[in-house]
Every structure is written in C-alpha cells, then in structure tokens.
Amino acid sequence: MKLRNAKLRLTGGFLALTFLLTGCAGIPTSSQVYYGEEISEDTSTQFVRVIARPPSEGMGPEEIVRGFLDASADPSENYGIARQYLAVEIAGKWNPLTGIEIYESSTVEVTGDSAALNVTAGKIGTISDLGRYQSGDPGAEVSKSFDLEQDSAGQWRIGNLSDGILLSSGDVDRSFRSFPIYFFNTALTSLVTDTVLVPVSNSGAATSLVRSLLDGPSPYLSPVATSAFPVGTALTYGSVPITNGVAQVDLSNEVLGADEQTRRALSAQLVWTLSTLSNVSAVQISVSGQPLALDNVGSLQTMQDWQSLSTSPNQDQTVLNVIRNEKIFSVINEAENLKYISQTPLVFASPDLTDTQIATVTADRKSIQVTNSAESNFKLVAQGDQISKPTWDRDGNIYFSDFGQGVREVMPDGAIRVVSVDASTLGTSNQVKSVAVSSDGVRVAVVLSNGTQDVIAVGAIFKTDSETRIIGLHRIERSITSVRDIVWSSPTSIAAIGSDESKSDLLFDVSLLDGKTKLFSTPVGAQQVSVDGTGKLYISAVDGTNQLVYQQSFGSWAQIASGIGGFFTN
C-alpha cells in the first residue's frame, strides 16, 4: 500500500501552479467579478506576497544574477518573472521544481567575471521536491554557477543554469507554512508523525496537505511507515474546499477496492492531518461524489473518532517522580511519597508507555535495572561502561547507548541485541551517546559525539526478527556544539540541554517542522530535561551539593522539588 514518492508535476505538485500568488495583486478591471459560495477563510495561507521585478534595460551581469535570485521568490505564472532573466533558449527548459536550497541573504557573495559568475552564501537547509525540510551542516555553503551571455539587443541574460531554485530564509518564511502530517506503521496499528512544508497559496493548505499525504512519507520513514491510500489515489476535483469548518475530500475510484481496515486507516490519516488547520473542525470523505461508509463512524469525521491513535504522550502522565540517591519519590502538590528503593544509587529513570515498568540506570552508569511499577524489586537487565538514559518503544523494548560501544536494545524476554546505526556522514555507531524514542515508537533522536562536536539527528527504527537498525539519520539543527541531554518535547520537536559557540548553557527547543529553534536560559548546573504529558518542560540541576528539579513557567524556572532525573507517571 505504499505510495511511490512522485516527483512534482507542473499540474499538481508541491511547488507548482498551486502558488498562484498573483491572486493578491488586485481585481482586474477588464472582466466581470463573479461571486461563488462563501467558504471559511483558510488563515494558514495568509502571507506577504513577493512581487518580483523584471529585468530592466542596461542591467549588468551581477545585477541580472541578483535580480534573478530576488525574482525566484515569486512563483506566479510558473516563475514567469524569473524566466525573463534567462536566455530565450533555456527559459523554457529550466525546472525550478526539483527542490530548494535555503541561504542566509546577508552572506550572499557574487564573484567571477562578466560571462561566468558564481553565487555563494551560508546554507541554512533544503526543501525537497516533496516539501521535506533538512537542516544544513554548520559552515555549509550554497554555491551556484551562472553563465551569462548578451542577446541580439546587447542585454545580458543567464545562458546556462542548473535546475532548482535558491531562496533566502526570509522568502521561505513568507511563502511556506510547516505542518505535521500522519502516516501509519507498516502494521496499520498506530500513526507515525511526519512533517512537511507547503506553499501558501490561493488553493489553500488543505489541498497541499492532502497532496503530501498522497505522495507518501519522507524517504527516511518510507521503510517503516506507510500510507493507507491505494496506489494511484488522487483528489477527484484537484482541491480540498473548506465550508463551514468542514474539509471536503473527494477521492478517486481506487479507494473503492479498499477493505474496511484500509478505509479506516486512510480516514484517520486525513482527519489527523487536516485537523492541524485552525479552520477545520471536521472532515467529510467521499469517493467520486459518494460518501465513504465506515462502521460506527459518521459522515463528518472528527479527531474524537480517531483519538485512540494519538501520537502524543499520555496526557495523564503529570505526576513528577524524582531520584534521591537510591530512592525514588513521587511529588504531588508538594506532598512526597516514597515509591521505590534500589540497592544502589540511581541517576536516570524512564517509565514505559503503559506506566507498568520503570528502567533505571545506576549512578556509576554501568547498569540498567528494571522494576515493576507495582513493586520495588529491581532486576539487572544490562551492563556497560557509560550508559545513557534509557528509552522505551511501544513494544516494551528498552534502548540505550553505551558510549564508545554503540546502541543496545533490551527485549521483553531479557535478550540484548546490538542495534546498528546507519550514521552516514554524521559519525559512527560507537559515537552515539544518547538515544530517545518518540511517542509513536518509530522515530528516534540520537546524539552523536566525536569528542569535540555533538550532533542531534533524527532517524527511524527498522526492525526484523533478526536485527534492529536506526536508519535515515539526518541532522536537525546547525548551531548546537555540545549536548547534555535530549527529550521529545512534542511529536514534532526536540528539547536539548547544551551549548553553542557562545559556550553558554542553554535549553534548545528544535522544531522538526522547519528547523527553527527556541532558546531558553537554564538553571545553574542543568543536567537533564524531561517533559510531562501536557508538554511542560522540566530540568534537573546539580548545583554544588544541591540537586533540584525546576519547572518552566512563563519563560523562567521555578524550583519545585529536590532530586534529579525527573520523570512522569499517571
């Protein structure tokens, strides 16, 4: 049921004529104005339109190149203004829809002679032809060559140009919006969160989001996530109108051959994805004009129909638990209750997703112990030299890194499996010093360190009966140089305690949607970061002999308990 990742087409792809930004230019006086059915405003598509200027007579080669870069931010009429900067013979051949490189406009340099110029700038990241953002490496540059020639009128034009476009970060901020979209694990039993950047346009974000669903998951997720839509499924009318808060999705006949499980799954994907839009309260799904019938689900589907598939952490996990030496206490409204006593002091603790087991790491970071949440009987399950904070998947497997030795998985039956890490250019398996599984159980965040530079990357867990691998790792930000701890702060963001080139201790909250990072100061001695079921962030800090837990409150930190290793249960 996986969809092949279709490349963008001029008639319906990610960056194509769906932009239609010229709709904001004003009402033409040469034709009548027709009034149609009133639909609710899609506020997610509001933007500041970029109005490009065509080349003027007598522009020099560098002015032509810079003018082309500016005009590339206006996709109206299939980048009609930008094409005016190109020689006639290549204007129709240039394909801007193969992807975007994002640069920092303040770093642009144009070098070379009149006939051959090169543009370089600091690279922020890329947006693929399917709308997936990826952060650039620190120090990376965008570099593009421009061969110029004079036409018959003596005007300079770009005569040779590779496909794709360059956009400044400001242009991207004006022209794109980021959203989560939802696929399934390969068993169609739970949702997996993906992310996409879509162009703001008169066709609306709803249409772009459904097209992204039909294109299938990001490449790094495609081995472990699937779309329930049958191959070839399309939007019957090419768009998704929203009327009185109801997104109307009419799908092609391929859906008619799907069984009940598949229809329910694709319905859940649509509802979860479209409900991220503020002006969508329900989704109405049809096939070639006929309602899609589902058992025990009405024609207007809402999040309540598919709430059991939530990828968010358990919202009931708001009870703070803290470690003090060998003891674990729960803290409720400043009242403390001793819950567990280990034989040795502890430093980390993490509950499983069902809140029935807790994995702990001894203070020397050489042993992992597990206790049943109903009793205080600690069982040794793994040993190492420098064990990280443990993390659980949905199947009750524990993952941890043993820095210098690699990543390990503890199976429910007690067996230990070596997890291979496809780290690519980011590092090696032995350089993983921290690992955190997301609440959907498929995606995973890791910290790799070569001893001088730390990197936060996100990938996916690929499992068979005989092996477990972390695949598709890709960097999610460029500025962090060292990392002390990480946590999934939401299904689409990761919080990290660390530092950047300023060497200051900071809390970074990195969005996986668009790579943007929020920065916060931290309490003195910040060591660990955790998040409760409602998304509130907490920091455990060690200041001299004091071990304290702080809660983030309106941008500052309030001390709420003594101890370390804060974690949350029901």
Image (tube, grey):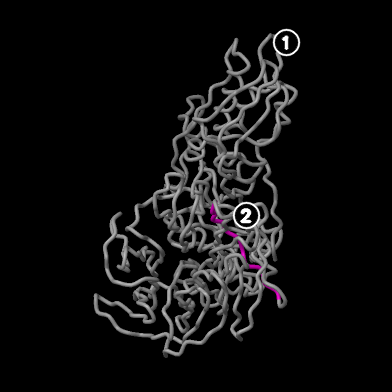
> Which of the numbered marks, if any, corresponds to residue 152?
1
Q: Position of residue 182 (x, y in %)?
A: 55, 62
Q: Is residue 154 visible?
A: yes
Residue at mark 2 to residue at mark 1: CA–CA distance: 46 Å
Q: Are marks 2 and 1 in contact (CB under 8 Å)?
A: no
Q: To which quarter of the image does residue 456 belong?
A: bottom right
SS type, badge 1: loop
In magenta, the rendered stretch is 453-464
Q: Residues within 10 Å of mark 1 (few under 14, many from 20)?
A: few
In the rendered image, residue 338, in percent from the top left (x then y), is placed at: 32, 84
| Quadrant in which the C terminus is drawn | bottom left
Residue 43 located left or right of residue 236: left
Number of callouts in the render?
Answer: 2
Q: Quadrant of residue 232?
A: bottom right
Relative placement, left or right, of 122 versus 227 is left
Residue 231, position as x, y percentages in the image: 71, 61
Q: Is residue 462 magenta?
A: yes
Query: Could you tell whether 383 is left or right of 503 in the image?
Result: right
| Badge nearest the viewer, 2 or 1 | 1
Q: Residue placed at 39% from the left, 64% from the top?
A: 535
- Asked if residue 538 can be seen in this view, the reply is no
Residue sitting farthest toward the left: 334
Which element type, helix, strand or loop, lies under badge 2? loop
The kind of residue on which mark 1 rests is Ser
Q: Main secondary structure of the magenta part?
A: strand
Q: Which residue is mark 2?
A: 235
- The numbered disc on residue 113 is none
Residue at image location 67% in from the left, 23% down from the top: 86
User: Three-letter amino acid code at disc 2?
Assistant: Leu
Name the residue rendered at 72%, 10% in the picture. Answer: 152
161 or 96: which is nearer to us?
161
